[in-house]
Image: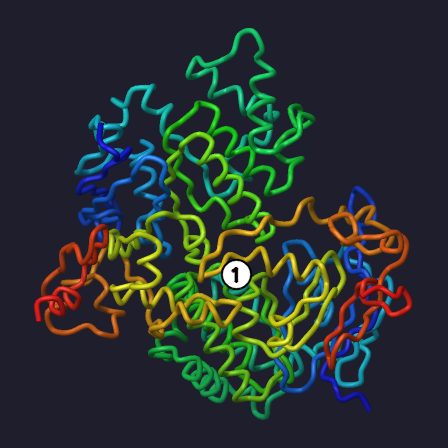
């Protein structure tokens, strides 16, 4: 029996475009254990959102899954029918989107929208409006919202950015869930508000023992919120390790460069940055997708795709530099 | 000649509200601020959204006419009415905007984008007009092939480099950088910041750097000014700002930054847990505008608005607490 909440194996996803078939995800592997907080860190366009949208099967119509599998609590997500999917979205996984101005409907009150989420959650008695309201108020109170009754009567535009994002968190956790996915929940917020929202998210997830996948481009946010980090580059998970270990030692040249690029609060200047840009997904490099920007790339990197190598307990890296059969390092 | 390239004294910018319930009131976007920038230095203007940092920048480059106050550029007072600002002054203060996707004309090729300011300011090298633009591209590390591309064909970082080249084209003395890297990834941000540092050294440029990112400020700016609701809360040289912050808001901002190492955690010495959000600039709280969020607010803060006080050379703070501590 699979002990993981969700397991993704060798997932390949592309998009049909006018220019041809863009190959975005190139064999993604990922697992999340019950109660574990995991983050996916990577730069714009590396496929973070595509990966998590695939778990909920809410990909755009142009998306094509060309291989791999997603297993949620022993069930194949990619083979689910409509009612199974509704069950998955209603009781299994919920999602917090990046921009609450577009994920909350502007013409319904917060109360109406929260009731709708609770109604389809499969929660006992959730079809009764009284219970819906009770659950909604409780969820809002738990996210430290002042005056929840008034919030339920409000429209999204009447709330500030930080409050809207806390409403999204309340909505996602209003009924019990196995897992919450938060897709850059604080990118549009100021640092002081970001700090509040992340603290509430972390606290709520820990209290309910829910698993969390947090997508972010900030390693700092990942470090302060999650237990384990996946570093993603151009459709591949290039490295994964428990948070403290990853910041102690980075193996993949990309992770190393990424960590160096971050300006430090303690000073010391700015690193050089990474030359070049993310590959064109219409015609990506056949071997390792980081090879064109990698200072340490050698022949094999251009021909074969590297697989995960264990470099420590639950520290894995997809790089030929650490492959025993090459004999390097 | 004074060492200050730019001096801003008691600048105010109010936007009157002409419709709706709050008609007759005004948004006090910038409310009585003073600062100066020395030749060759970088002043970082830091604050949350709605604190008035961009409004300040737009007043400096002349996109807005200030409501009151004085801007002195190279010892010469600039009129508050932007229509009276001569072309030669516009040439010397340039700007790089936040989002190069919307501030570069998508239908013009790189060559046209860069030659427009040269034509306006009559700086075109008649003997070698193309060579002049190629040299500008080289300055920002872009290849010559880009001359005939449109901004759409460039990546986000390359577009921002092009925006920097456009700002450089008129050979300015002061460049206003309005969150130049906040839309970019860290790997590209590092490249742009290094480029800006090099250009500053080569051309003795002064920067007014507007940002939200204090970690970047630590590594880029000479002095830091923190803005809150249209007012400056604290202004200090970078070193002192991070080792000895005085204002409770500064401490709150510092402790909210997510960092990646233990060494950085130490910089956040005073943990002040952020609470609340920035109030509306229409109904600014009475007394100190920060009193709604300040963990240390006391009676006086709700009655009287504090004034800027110098606590050390070059280090000014606007807080009753600091003032009282010094008196006792």
> Could you tell me which residue is drawn at 52 percent across and 38 percent down?
B102
Image quadrant where one finds the C terminus of chain A: bottom right
Does residue B21 appear in the picture of this structure? no
Q: Position of residue B42 (x, y in %)?
A: 37, 43
Q: Residue furthest top?
A: B127
Q: Position of residue B311 (x, y in %)?
A: 18, 58
> Could you tell me which residue is drawn at 60 percent across and 89 percent down?
A123
Does residue B132 appear in the picture of this structure? yes
Q: How dense is the environment of label 1, judged by Cα within 10 Å: few (below 14), some, or many (20 and up)?
A: some
> In which image quadrant can residue A324 be found?
bottom right
* Closer-to-camera residue (A72/B68): B68
Q: Which residue is mark 1?
A: A99
Letter of the chain that mark 1 sits on in the rendering: A
Q: Is residue B269 above or below residue B101?
A: below
> Could you tell me which residue is drawn at 78 percent across and 74 percent down?
A8
Judged left or right of residue A305, residue A72 is left
* Closer-to-camera residue (A38/A171): A38
Image quadrant where one finds the N terminus of chain A: bottom right
Which color scheme does this rendered protein use?
A: rainbow
* Closer-to-camera residue (B96/B262): B262
Q: Is residue A287 above or below residue A128?
A: above
Q: Secondary structure at mark 1?
A: loop
Judged left or right of residue B155, residue B235 is left
Figure disc tally: 1
Q: Position of residue B197 (x, y in %)?
A: 48, 41
Judged left or right of residue A45, residue A175 is left
Q: Position of residue A211 (x, y in %)?
A: 63, 82
* Closer-to-camera residue (A272/A210): A272
């Amino acid at each position: 029996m699979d002990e993981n909440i969700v397991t993704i194996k060798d997932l390949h996803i592309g998009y049909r475009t006018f220019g041809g078939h863009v190959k975005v995800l190139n064999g993604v592997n990922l697992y999340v254990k019950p109660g574990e907080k995991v983050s996916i860190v990577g730069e714009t366009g590396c496929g973070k959102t595509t990966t998590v949208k695939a778990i909920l099967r809410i990909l755009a119509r142009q998306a094509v899954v060309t291989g791999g599998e997603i297993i949620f609590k022993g069930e194949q997500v990619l083979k689910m029918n409509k009612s199974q999917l509704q069950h998955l979205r209603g009781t299994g996984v919920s999602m917090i989107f990046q921009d609450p101005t577009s994920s909350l409907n502007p013409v319904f009150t917060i109360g109406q929208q929260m009731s709708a989420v609770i109604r389809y959650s499969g929660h006992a008695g959730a079809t009764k409006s009284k219970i819906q309201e009770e659950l909604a108020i409780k969820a809002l109170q738990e996210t430290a919202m002042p005056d929840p009754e008034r919030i339920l009567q409000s429209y999204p535009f009447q709330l500030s950015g930080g409050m809207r994002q806390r409403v999204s968190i309340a909505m996602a956790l209003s009924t019990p869930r196995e897992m919450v996915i938060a897709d850059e929940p604080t990118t549009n917020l100021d640092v002081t508000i970001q700090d509040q929202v992340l603290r509430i998210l972390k606290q709520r997830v820990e209290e309910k023992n829910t698993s969390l996948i947090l997508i972010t481009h900030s390693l700092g946010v990942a470090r302060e919120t999650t237990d384990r980090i996946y570093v993603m580059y151009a459709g591949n998970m290039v490295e994964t390790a428990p948070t403290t270990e990853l910041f102690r030692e980075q193996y993949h040249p990309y992770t190393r460069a990424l960590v160096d690029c971050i300006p430090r609060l303690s000073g010391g200047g700015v690193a050089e940055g990474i030359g070049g840009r993310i590959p064109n997904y219409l015609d990506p490099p056949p071997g390792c997708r980081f090879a064109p920007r990698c200072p340490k790339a050698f022949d094999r990197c251009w021909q074969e795709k590297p697989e995960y190598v264990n470099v420590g307990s639950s520290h894995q890296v997809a790089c030929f530099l650490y492959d025993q059969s090459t004999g390097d390092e | 000649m004074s060492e200050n390239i730019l001096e801003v004294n008691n600048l105010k910018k109010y936007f009157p509200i002409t419709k709706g319930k709050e008609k007759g009131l005004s948004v006090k976007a910038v409310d009585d601020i003073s600062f100066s920038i020395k030749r060759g230095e970088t002043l970082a203007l830091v604050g949350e959204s709605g604190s008035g940092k961009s409004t300040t920048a737009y007043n400096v480059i002349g996109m807005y006419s200030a409501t009151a106050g004085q801007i002195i550029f190279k010892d010469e007072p600039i009129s508050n009415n932007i229509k009276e600002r001569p072309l030669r002054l516009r040439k010397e203060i340039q700007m790089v905007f936040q989002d190069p996707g919307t501030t570069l004309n998508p239908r013009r090729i790189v060559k046209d984008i860069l030659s427009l300011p040269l034509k306006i300011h009559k700086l075109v090298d008649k003997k070698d007009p193309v060579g002049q633009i190629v040299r500008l591209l080289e300055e920002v590390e872009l290849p010559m092939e880009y001359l005939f591309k449109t901004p759409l064909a460039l990546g986000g970082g390359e577009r921002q480099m092009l925006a920097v080249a456009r700002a450089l084209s008129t050979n300015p003395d002061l460049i206003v950088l309005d969150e130049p890297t906040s839309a970019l990834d860290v790997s590209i941000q590092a490249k742009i910041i290094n480029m800006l540092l090099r250009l500053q050294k080569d051309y003795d440029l002064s920067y007014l750097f507007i940002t939200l990112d204090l970690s970047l400020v630590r590594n880029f700016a000479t002095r830091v000014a923190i803005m809150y609701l249209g007012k400056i809360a604290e202004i200090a040289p970078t070193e002192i700002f991070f080792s000895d912050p005085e204002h409770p808001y500064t401490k709150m901002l510092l402790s909210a930054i997510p960092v990646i190492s233990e060494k950085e955690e130490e910089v956040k010495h005073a943990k002040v847990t952020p609470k609340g959000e920035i109030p509306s600039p229409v109904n600014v709280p009475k007394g100190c505008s920060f009193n709604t969020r300040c963990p240390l607010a006391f009676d006086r803060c709700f009655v009287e608005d504090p004034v800027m006080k110098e606590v050390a050379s070059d280090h000014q703070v606007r807080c009753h607490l600091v003032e009282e501590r010094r008196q006792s």
